[in-house]
Image: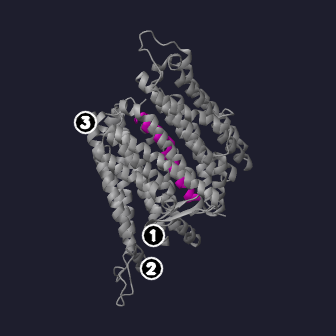
């Protein structure tokens, strides 16, 4: 049973999705999805525990065909870390989202929502666990197609237009990725990532390898929403149902970042992609642009979901900045921020879901006085805001600390200055929401507000408390991230 | 002889020239058209270019299917065809979902011109 875990955590959600599509009863589908997501979480955590305990990667031969001929599922520390993140968020959003899904999605579509949700989770887990370049593309498309559908389930008509926009951009990204894989396959004849890394060594300077690398990086950057390829992101986040936004923001882009790291550090190798190409410089400039352009645009948003979406563009910049720093400390910061950002942004979007439910809109001007009527939600927002700013004692501080240390190791003190400056921007845009909610009176004629349902508040607060807890006790995030960085850098040098 | 070499360069890579043409044509249609159906046509052409990129190097002239027999020594790699079968399925699914979204957009906005849909709305 334990030996089969890598296949089980992919196969079970896939089958459960088909079952949900047949049943389509809201309660039953929700229960199935919850049980499956939680089982995936337990499975992922078990595998991560095993890898940590025995210090040996789990390699699973799909169908008994040995790699590199067969497809290999591979769990090392990095993959295990991201698997745990994705399945954990998937479980939490299911608990959180039931009430808001009932309200925000038409009744006859509830069963389909859980079908698509499971498919999306399956795809995201698949991208992380597979050791095969083409298989990763298939899982990428499984997760993306179900994600477009999930976004289009939003009641607002703009949700459909946003989903279309995302579909066009996402497909261009995935196709670019597959063109790159095709070029590498033509010169090496293999699709297994580990095998590819070995066979590419003598071929790295050929035009085909460089072109393949360029296609893969641009394609994945589209999926990551790395500035300036982020145009699909704000609308998709802003108009998707609240539960979908929480899930999408916390997982989808993170998984693509994971894949990018795999290609840069494992397949092409540190010695080539970091030391002999201008990729780190390009990513660094784009990351800094993302941080400032994202934060500046967030300042002027009236729709707070859209504001948080632009803030996500900026936060993705922090994560990719760690990749560009390309030293152990910076990469640790990047990996830690993948987890931390998922937790804090997930919590913030969950709270916004509660606001959308009670206030009826997510416009800033309609939230006046919400602090008095919805204290738990709005104090949660303050706490999440602190974490986004990077106040010591929250997770945001931990990741920024590692990024800053990584920059100093390279002697780039000006990056530290820019990081501080960007934190001020976060302070301003989060401060706007807090100012409106706490220091403005609610208009007399406005509808009276009350707290969001308990299930939503409790899940969001569990995440917020995790923000504080992981800000003090970093043994899980930083501990695993540091070991995972050794895997990335060790395999490359 | 010079001219012959160039001819061989052009003709030898004719599958790649066509691939490059399809990639550029597809991308150009996606960028330049405002009609959402036409955009999806461009997207399809863009995806189709990948099929050629994979399948054409898989063909070895004189090679047979990989069946072990004493009569044959040259085999074609069947893997690219299998991969592209998967990619075709993905392409069909993407196109179907894209068209379904366009139908919904048409119902909601009464237009499938991107200019009408995206500029006629307050996105904030």
Question: How far across and how far down the image is residue A77, in percent?
Answer: 60, 56
Q: Chain of mark 3?
A: B
Stretch in magenta: A238-264
Is residue A42 found left or right of B73 in the rendered image?
A: right
Q: Is residue A89 left or right of residue B46?
A: right
What residue is shown at x 73% (from left), y 46% (from top)? A408
Which of the 4 quarters of the picture holds residue A265? Answer: bottom right
Q: Pointer 1: what residue?
A: A64
Q: Position of residue A91 (x, y in %)?
A: 47, 42
Residue B2 badge: 2
**SS at mark 3?**
helix
Mark 2 or 3 closer to N-term? 2
Q: Is residue B56 left or right of residue A482?
A: left
- Front: mark 2 or 3: 3
> Which of the chains bears the disc numbered 1?
A
Q: CA distance from mark 2 to mark 1?
A: 53 Å
A447 is within the stretch colored magenta: no
Q: Which residue is mark 3?
A: B107
* Front in this rendered view, residue A443 or A459: A459
Q: Is residue A270 above or below residue A281?
A: below
Q: Name the mark on residue B30.
A: none
Verify CB contact (< 8 Å) between mark 2 and mark 1: no
**SS category of the residue bearing label 2:** helix
Pick whichever, B10 or B60, lies toward us. B60
């Amino acid at each position: 049973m334990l030996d089969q875990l890598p296949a089980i955590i992919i196969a079970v959600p896939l089958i459960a999705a088909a079952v949900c599509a047949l049943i389509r009863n809201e309660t039953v589908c929700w229960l199935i999805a919850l049980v499956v997501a939680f089982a995936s979480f337990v499975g992922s955590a078990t595998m991560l525990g095993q890898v940590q305990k025995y210090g040996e990667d789990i390699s699973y031969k799909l169908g008994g065909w040995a790699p590199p001929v067969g497809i290999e599922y591979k769990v090392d520390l990095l993959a295990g870390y991201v698997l745990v993140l994705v399945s954990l968020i998937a479980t939490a959003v299911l608990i959180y989202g039931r009430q808001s899904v009932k309200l925000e999605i038409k009744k006859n579509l509830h069963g389909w929502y859980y079908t698509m949700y499971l498919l999306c989770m399956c795809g995201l887990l698949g991208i992380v666990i597979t050791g095969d370049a083409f298989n990763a593309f298939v899982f990428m498309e499984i997760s993306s197609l179900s994600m477009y559908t999930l976004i289009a389930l939003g009641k607002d008509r703009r949700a459909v237009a946003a989903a279309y926009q995302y579909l066009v951009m996402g497909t261009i990204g995935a196709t670019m990725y597959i063109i790159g894989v095709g070029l590498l396959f033509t010169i090496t004849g293999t699709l297994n990532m580990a095998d590819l890394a070995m066979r590419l060594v003598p071929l790295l300077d050929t035009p085909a390898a460089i072109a393949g690398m360029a296609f893969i990086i641009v394609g994945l950057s589209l999926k990551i929403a790395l500035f300036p390829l982020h145009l699909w992101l704000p609308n998709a986040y802003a108009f998707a149902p609240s539960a979908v936004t929480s899930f999408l923001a916390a997982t989808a882009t993170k998984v693509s970042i994971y894949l990018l790291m795999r290609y840069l550090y494992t397949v092409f190798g540190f010695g080539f992609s970091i030391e002999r190409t201008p990729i780190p410089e390009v990513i660094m400039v784009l990351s800094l642009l993302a941080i400032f352009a994202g934060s500046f645009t967030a300042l002027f948003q009236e729709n707070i979901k859209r504001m948080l979406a632009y803030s996500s563009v900026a936060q993705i910049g922090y994560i990719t900045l760690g990749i560009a720093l390309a030293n152990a400390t910076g990469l640790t910061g990047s990996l830690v921020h993948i987890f931390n950002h998922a937790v804090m942004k997930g919590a913030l979007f969950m709270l916004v879901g509660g606001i959308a439910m009670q206030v009826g809109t997510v416009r800033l001007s309609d939230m006046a006085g919400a602090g008095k009527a919805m204290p738990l939600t709005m104090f949660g927002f303050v706490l999440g805001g602190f974490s986004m700013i990077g106040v010591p004692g929250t997770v945001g501080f931990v990741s920024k600390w590692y990024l800053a240390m990584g920059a100093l190791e390279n002697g780039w003190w000006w990056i530290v200055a820019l990081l501080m400056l960007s934190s001020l921007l976060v302070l301003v845009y989060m401060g706007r929401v807090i100012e409106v909610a706490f220091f403005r009176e609610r208009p007399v004629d406005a509808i009276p507000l009350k707290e969001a349902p308990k299930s939503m508040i409790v899940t969001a607060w569990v995440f917020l408390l995790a923000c504080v807890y992981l800000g003090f006790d970093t043994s899980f995030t930083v501990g695993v991230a540091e070991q995972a960085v050794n895997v990335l850098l060790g395999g490359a040098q | 002889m010079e001219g012959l070499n160039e001819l061989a360069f052009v003709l030898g890579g004719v599958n790649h020239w066509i691939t490059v043409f399809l990639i550029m044509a597809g991308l150009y249609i996606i960028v330049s058209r405002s009609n959402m159906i036409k955009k999806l046509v461009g997207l399809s052409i863009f995806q189709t270019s990948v099929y050629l990129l994979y399948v054409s190097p898989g063909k070895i002239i004189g090679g047979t299917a990989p069946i072990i027999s004493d009569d044959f020594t040259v085999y074609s790699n069947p893997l690219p065809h299998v991969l592209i079968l998967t990619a075709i399925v993905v392409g069909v699914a993407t196109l179907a979902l894209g068209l379904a979204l366009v139908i919904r957009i048409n119902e909601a906005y009464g237009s499938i011109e991107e200019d009408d849909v995206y500029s006629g709305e307050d996105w904030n």
